[in-house]
């Protein structure tokens, strides 16, 4: 029976690209009875990364240099902070470097001051000003049913429309980035949404609106829109920071599994307050992130710095000298131009476009003018007949035993 439809996507380092995009798929195709009767799930696309270095040098277990899985756990830094920091530095187009200072900046400046600040100030304001929960329709529009019916009128709720106009396009871009497996772009768009929330909160000044009975409904509508954005952010964060997402959803009295970015959420992002269960009672909100001190990072940097061997020191000096010599040569001549920039590795290869064909080896003989080469006739089932191929496999593969 035919198995379920699966789109197989693989993630790996750049040194594994040839095997997983050519060699292994060829093996799977060759082991099938025919293209129509292939029992294997073939890879659709692959996302690869360049190399990640540690404080300007290579990770090394033998020299105790760098932070590895068990080490990261022992630091006491929450797993979601590690996930965010490492994915924000994911080497998607070129090599990148892990630095402790970057981790501090991302935790304190992005997670705490941007994302955590918006979520906590929104939920805390709602809890403190609206009876321990989210605003109700009465808070937003007044006691009459006629006034409350305006909640379905897009033009009546200018606050909702304003925040939704800023956030909805960012959510669409986020979905596109995730489909293309561009993790770093996805994280940037989460922070962009949160930044829009902070700007909106600051500009509307709900603490001022709340003081006047005439403007209290405006305050409630502004806070309801912010709460809707909090829900959107929780869903966007889930692939990167699942523990944080679960905490936000729990505080909002949603099931911890209610993080799907479905059509309802995408459409609702245009009018965020409609994603809010109005009038819901919530517990006192919790802080999502804590600051990491500079002193603590200095300790971590010293702990995981490792030791440099004499051989490593010599290799580093040689590398530095070679680089200096190369720069001098480029400046002094050689066409007077700069060297060509290295093209970044394609991080999102759609291998479904490859047309791999398995042929039958008909004949093999040694090349008359080269001891290391085979001459081969391969039948690919083409109308034009067999193909003649030369390969340097002598001494590596006994092709003569594989004829037929």
Image: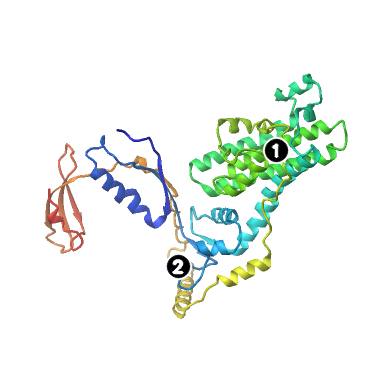
Quadrant in the picture for residue 257? top right
Q: Whole-percent x and y of residue 68?
A: 50, 63
46 lies above or below 302 = above
In contact (CB < 8 Å): disc 1 and disc 2? no
**Residue on which disc 1 sits:** 227
At 50% from the left and 55% from the top, the residue drawn is 91
Percent position of residue 401, x then y: 12, 55
Name of the residue lying farthest toward the bottom: 310
Cα separation, mark 1 vs mark 2, equals 62 Å
Q: Is residue 307 visible?
A: yes
Q: Horizontally, is 297 left or right of 92 in the view?
A: right
**Residue 98 is at least partly visible in this image:** no
Residue 380 in the image: x percent, y percent?
19, 42
Residue at 47% across / 61% down in the picture? 338
Mark 1: give few (<14), some (14-19) or many (20+) Cα within 10 Å. many
**Which label belongs to residue 333?**
2
Q: Give the left or right position of residue 7, taking residue 38 as reference.
A: right
Q: Residue at x 60, y 30 (%)?
A: 267
Q: Which mark is residue 400?
A: none
Q: Residues within 10 Å of mark 2 (few under 14, many from 20)?
A: few
232 with respect to 335 (left or right): right
What secondary structure is found at the residue carrying circle 2? Answer: loop
Which of the 4 quarters of the picture holds residue 358? top left
Q: Earlier in the sequence, mark 1 or mark 2?
A: 1
């Amino acid at each position: 029976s035919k198995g379920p439809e699966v789109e197989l996507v693989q993630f790996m380092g750049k040194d594994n690209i040839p095997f997983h995009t050519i060699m292994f798929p060829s093996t799977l195709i060759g082991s099938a009875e025919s293209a129509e009767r292939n029992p294997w799930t073939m890879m659709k696309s692959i996302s690869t990364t360049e190399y990640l270095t540690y404080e300007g040098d290579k990770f090394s277990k033998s020299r105790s240099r760098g932070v590895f899985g068990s080490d990261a756990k022992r630091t006491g830094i929450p797993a979601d902070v590690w996930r965010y920091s490492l994915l924000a530095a994911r080497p998607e187009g070129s090599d990148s470097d892990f630095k402790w200072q970057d981790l501090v900046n991302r935790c304190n400046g992005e997670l705490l001051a941007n994302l955590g600040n918006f979520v906590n100030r929104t939920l805390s304001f709602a809890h403190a000003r609206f009876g321990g929960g989210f605003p109700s329709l009465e808070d937003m529009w007044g006691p009459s049913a006629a006034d409350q019916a305006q909640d379905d009128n897009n033009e009546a709720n200018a606050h909702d429309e304003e925040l939704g106009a800023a956030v909805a396009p960012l959510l669409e871009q986020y979905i596109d980035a995730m489909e293309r497996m561009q993790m770093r772009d996805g994280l940037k768009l989460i922070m962009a949404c949160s930044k829009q929330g902070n700007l909106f909160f600051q500009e509307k000044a709900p603490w001022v609106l709340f003081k006047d009975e005439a403007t209290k409904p405006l305050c409630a509508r502004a806070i309801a829109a912010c709460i809707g954005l909090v829900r959107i952010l929780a869903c966007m964060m889930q692939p990167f920071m699942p523990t944080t997402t679960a905490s936000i959803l729990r505080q909002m009295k949603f099931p911890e599994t209610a993080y799907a970015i479905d059509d309802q959420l995408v459409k609702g992002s245009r009018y965020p307050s409609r994603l809010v269960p109005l009038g819901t009672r919530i517990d006192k909100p919790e802080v999502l992130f804590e600051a990491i001190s500079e002193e603590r990072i200095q300790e971590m940097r010293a702990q995981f710095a490792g030791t440099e061997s004499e051989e490593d020191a010599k290799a580093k000096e040689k590398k530095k000298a070679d680089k200096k010599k190369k720069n001098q040569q480029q400046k002094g001549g050689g066409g007077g131009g700069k060297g060509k920039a290295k093209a970044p590795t394609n991080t999102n290869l759609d291998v479904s476009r490859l047309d791999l064909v398995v042929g039958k080896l008909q004949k093999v003989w040694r090349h008359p003018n080269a001891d290391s080469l085979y001459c081969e006739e391969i039948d690919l089932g083409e109308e034009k007949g067999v193909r003649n191929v030369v390969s340097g496999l002598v001494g590596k593969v006994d092709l003569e035993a594989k004829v037929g």
